[in-house]
Image (spheres, rainbow, N blue to C red):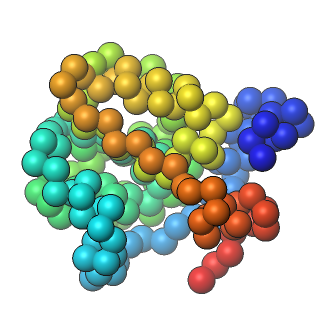
């Protein structure tokens, strides 16, 4: 569990472990047809994308290879920032994202971004991979302006990702 990891590793070591993991096992560039199928089958994603009050500028904290960022671009948004700790993931994203500024940064420290700047902050499936999920949430709220939206999600405890990351302690490639 996260608390046990904190006992064995210092915060910077935990960040390095995460960075190294995603540099070694990056997600692959999403195929647009697969993305549209994913949206059509996933009601939670439809509900997020159906929000009429998503407004630019937008930041995707922990964007990885840009799956959600690409969905936003396909929906017509152009003022987007994608942030990730993995150089490799960002290297994949830069090959197909057209309207997104990509930044290599740590989700627990977004100080390079001004307070109250973004109208929409996405942080989907990221915070639980950091040494301080609460700090990630605090940073998301800090950079979101008053009246803006923070869309924040973590994996369910007994989901596929739970067994993948916690129990098997490795990435299962499907």
x, y percent for residue 88? 55, 57
In the rendered view, tell whether residue 128 sits above or below residue 147.
below
Quarter assignment of residue 59: top left
Given residues 42 and 13, the one toward you in this image is 42
Residue 174 seen in this snapshot: yes
The structure residue drawn at horizontal position 59% and vertical position 65%, both measured from the top left corner, is: 159
Q: How many marks?
A: 0
> Looking at this rendering, what residue extends furthest in the top direction?
115
Q: Choose between 91 and 106: the one closer to the eye.
A: 106
Name of the residue lying farthest toward the right: 8
Vertical arrangement, residue 129 with respect to residue 49, above or below: above
Quadrant of the rendered image containing residue 171: bottom right
Check the image and report above or below for 139 versus 60. above
The quarter of the rendered structure image containing the C terminus is: bottom right
Of residues 14 and 100, the one nearer the viewer is: 14
Question: How far across and how far down the image is residue 166, in percent?
Answer: 74, 58
39 with respect to 50 (left or right):
right
Indicate left or right for 26 with 131 as reference. Answer: left
Expressed as whole percent of the image width and height from the top left, the position of residue 74 reads: 18, 64
Residue situated in front as seen by the camera: 139 or 98: 139
The residue under the point 47% across, 24% down is 138
Q: Position of residue 30 (x, y in %)?
A: 38, 72
Asked whether, in this view, residue 159 is left or right of residue 98, the answer is right
**Residue occupying the point 84% across, 40% down:** 4
- Camera sees residue 32: no
Residue depicted at 52% across the width and 67% down the height: 27
């Amino acid at each position: 569990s996260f608390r046990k990891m904190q006992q064995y590793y210092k915060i910077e070591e935990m960040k390095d472990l995460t960075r190294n993991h995603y540099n070694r096992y990056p997600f692959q560039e999403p195929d647009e047809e697969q993305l549209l199928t994913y949206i059509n089958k996933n009601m939670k994603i439809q509900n997020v994308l159906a929000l009429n009050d998503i407004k630019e500028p937008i930041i995707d904290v922990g964007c990885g290879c840009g799956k959600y960022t690409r969905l936003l671009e396909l929906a017509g948004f152009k003022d987007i920032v994608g942030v990730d700790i993995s150089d490799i993931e960002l290297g994949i994203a830069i090959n197909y994202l057209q309207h997104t500024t990509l930044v290599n940064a740590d989700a627990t420290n977004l100080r390079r971004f001004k307070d109250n700047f973004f109208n929409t902050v996405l942080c989907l499936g990221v915070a639980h991979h950091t040494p301080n999920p609460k700090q990630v949430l605090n940073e998301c709220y800090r950079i979101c302006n008053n009246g803006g939206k923070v869309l924040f999600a973590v994996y369910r405890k007994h989901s596929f990702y739970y067994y993948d990351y916690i129990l098997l302690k490795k990435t299962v490639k499907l």
